[in-house]
């Protein structure tokens, strides 16, 4: 059942009087409906004003070293041992009939999606701060690899598969650029935009768009939940912010919106979790 609440119906009629409400609503169920109205109004107000939604996490900062510690300690509940369902469901939209597409994976971890794509004839370039995550990717997928320094990024290394077209850079994401690997025909962003510090999102969006070739198709996975109940990461990314970050230079299309709540997420003490998947493509006039 869908109930629409029109606040104009209450204006000037004394509806806000507790006495009037008590006489009008005699059952607990009616109060539940009113609470639903109020909750819906609160959520809608926050969604139409991203700054309100983002406020609880605006100053949340995760240092690069903290992510390395999570990998070292095995606190990687964000890793999925199977190919992400949103990538499988939307792969045709990403490929758009193109063979041998070059994919970029920001903050790639040891995502099995990389081998899944490489097995289908595509190439993958990933960036990850954790050396342990990168080595585990190759070892767990039984892939031989080589290790080389990256002259243009002091202290960085690149790990290259001997069998598949997969190159993983161990470095700070923001030190990576198109001068190192050129631009890409596709990007799969699952667990990256939602992981970076919220205050860095403009810088992140600028980097990602600079890595997009003119025909690039960028699949972006985001999460919605009540940030008052969970500090993150993963962090909340309102739909409106996706449009504000990428909209000036890109077309942004919402492909799917699904209930993503699981038992693991309930442990965060949140009351809902929505997963949204967007397809981001450069506008015809954009050039980076």
Image (cartoon, rainbow, N blue to C red):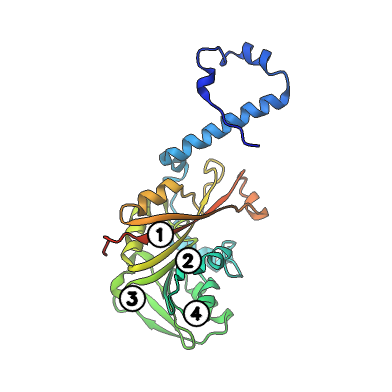
Q: Secondary structure at mark 4?
A: helix
What residue does disc 3 label?
181
Q: Nearer the viewer, residue 54 or 255?
A: 255
Discs 3/1, front: 1
Marks 4 and 1, the one that precedes in the sequence: 4
Q: What's the distance in space between the residues labelled 1 and 2, CA to CA?
A: 11 Å
Discs 2/3, front: 2
Q: Secondary structure at mark 2?
A: helix
Residue 234 in percent (x, y) is at 51, 54
Discs 2/4, front: 2
Discs 1/2, front: 2
Q: What's the distance in space between the residues labelled 3 and 1, CA to CA?
A: 20 Å
Q: What's the distance in space between the residues labelled 4 and 1, CA to CA?
A: 22 Å
What residue does disc 1 label?
280
Tag 4 and tag 3, C-beta contact below 8 Å: no
Name the residue located 51 percent from the left edge and 80 percent from the top edge: 120
* Mark linked to residue 93: 2
What residue does disc 4 label?
118
- Label 3 neighbourhood size at 10 Å, few (<14), some (14-19), many (20+)? few
Name the residue located 38 percent from the left edge and 66 percent from the top edge: 173
């Amino acid at each position: 059942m869908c109930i629409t609440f029109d606040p104009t119906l209450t204006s000037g009629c004394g509806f806000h009087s507790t006495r009037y409400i008590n006489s009008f609503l005699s059952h607990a169920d009616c109060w539940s409906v009113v609470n639903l109205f109020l909750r819906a109004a609160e959520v809608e107000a926050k969604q139409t004003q991203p700054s309100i939604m983002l406020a609880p996490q605006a100053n949340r900062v995760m240092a690069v070293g903290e992510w390395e510690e999570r990998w070292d300690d095995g606190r990687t509940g964000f890793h999925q041992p199977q190919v992400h369902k949103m990538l499988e469901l939307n792969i045709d939209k990403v490929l758009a009939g193109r063979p041998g597409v070059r994919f970029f994976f920001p903050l790639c971890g040891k995502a099995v999606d990389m081998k899944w794509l490489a097995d289908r004839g595509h190439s993958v370039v990933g960036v990850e701060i954790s050396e342990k995550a990168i080595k585990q990717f190759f070892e767990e997928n039984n892939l031989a690899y080589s290790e080389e320094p990256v002259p243009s990024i002091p202290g960085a290394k690149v790990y290259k598969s001997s069998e598949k077209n997969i190159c993983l850079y161990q470095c700070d994401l923001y030190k990576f650029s198109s001068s190192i690997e050129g631009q890409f025909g596709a990007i799969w962003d699952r667990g990256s935009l939602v992981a970076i510090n919220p205050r860095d999102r403009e810088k992140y969006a600028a980097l990602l768009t600079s890595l997009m070739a003119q025909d690039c198709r960028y699949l972006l996975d985001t999460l919605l939940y009540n940030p008052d109940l969970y500090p993150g990461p993963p962090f909340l990314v309102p739909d409106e912010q996706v449009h504000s970050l990428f909209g000036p230079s890109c077309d942004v299309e919402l492909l799917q919106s699904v209930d993503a709540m699981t038992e693991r997420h309930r442990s965060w003490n949140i009351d809902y979790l929505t997963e949204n998947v967007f397809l981001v493509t450069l506008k015809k006039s954009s050039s980076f």
